[in-house]
C-alpha cells in the first residue's frame, strides 16, 4: 500500500509540472493533456497486466498509484464549471464532454497499442 501511495504522489507531482507548463487561457490544456496521457498510460498498464506481462503489484503501482495521482477528472469538472461561470457555456460543455470522450478513446488506444507491441514481440521470439 505504501508503494502505491508513493507512486500516487509521484503522479500528482508530474501532473502539477505538466499543468504548470501547458496551462491554457481559453481551455485548460494542461489538465486535458494530463488526463489524455494518463488514460493512454492506464490502457497500456491494464493491457500489460491482462496479458500477464506485469503482475498485480506493478499494475496497482502504475495504474492505481501513478495514473490515479496523475489524472484528475475532478479538476476537469471544476474547470468546465468555471468556463460556464464565465459565460462560456459551450466551451465548458465541449471541454467536459469532449475531454471525457477523448480520454475513453485514449484509454482504448493505449490498450490496443500495448496488445500490438506484445503481439510483435511474441512473433519475434520464435
Image (cartoon, grey):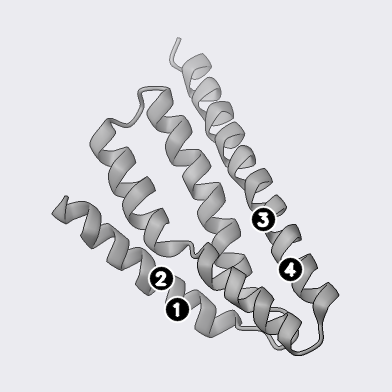
- Mark 3 vs 1, N-terminal side: 1
Q: Nearer the viewer, residue 62 or 64?
A: 64
Mark in front: 2 vs 4? 4
Give the CA separation, mark 1 to mark 2.
5 Å
Mark in front: 3 vs 1? 3
Q: Are marks 1 and 4 in contact (CB under 8 Å)?
A: no
Snapshot quadrant of residue 54 = top left
Q: Are marks 1 and 2 in contact (CB under 8 Å)?
A: yes
Residue 63 vertical placement versus 29 (above, below):
above
Residue hosting label 4: 95
Q: Residue furthest right?
A: 90
Q: Position of residue 1 (x, y in %)?
A: 17, 50
Q: Residues within 10 Å of mark 3 (few under 14, many from 20)?
A: some
Mark in front: 3 vs 2? 3
| Secondary element at image label 1 | helix
- Mark 1 vs 4, N-terminal side: 1
Tell me if I can see residue 28 in this picture.
no
Q: Residue furthest left?
A: 2
Q: Position of residue 82 (x, y in %)?
A: 66, 83
Residue plotted at (59% across, 44% down): 107
Give the CA separation, mark 3 to mark 4.
8 Å
Give the CA separation, mark 2 to mark 4.
22 Å
Residue hosting label 2: 14
Q: Position of residue 100 (x, y in %)?
A: 67, 55
Residue hosting label 3: 100
Tell me the number on the disc at residue 17.
1
**Direction from residue 97 to residue 77 in the image, left or right:** left
Amino acid at each position: 500500500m505504501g508503494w502505491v501511495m508513493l507512486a500516487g504522489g509521484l503522479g500528482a507531482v508530474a501532473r502539477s509540472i505538466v499543468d504548470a507548463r501547458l496551462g491554457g487561457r481559453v481551455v485548460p490544456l494542461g489538465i486535458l493533456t494530463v488526463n489524455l496521457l494518463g488514460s493512454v498510460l492506464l490502457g497500456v498498464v491494464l493491457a500489460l497486466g491482462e496479458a500477464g506481462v506485469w503482475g498485480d503489484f506493478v499494475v496497482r503501482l502504475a495504474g492505481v498509484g501513478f495514473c490515479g495521482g496523475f489524472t484528475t477528472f475532478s479538476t476537469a469538472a471544476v474547470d468546465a464549471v468555471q468556463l460556464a461561470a464565465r459565460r462560456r457555456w459551450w466551451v465548458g460543455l465541449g471541454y467536459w464532454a469532449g475531454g471525457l470522450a477523448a480520454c475513453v478513446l485514449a484509454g482504448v488506444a493505449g490498450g490496443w497499442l500495448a496488445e500490438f507491441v506484445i503481439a510483435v514481440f511474441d512473433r519475434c521470439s520464435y
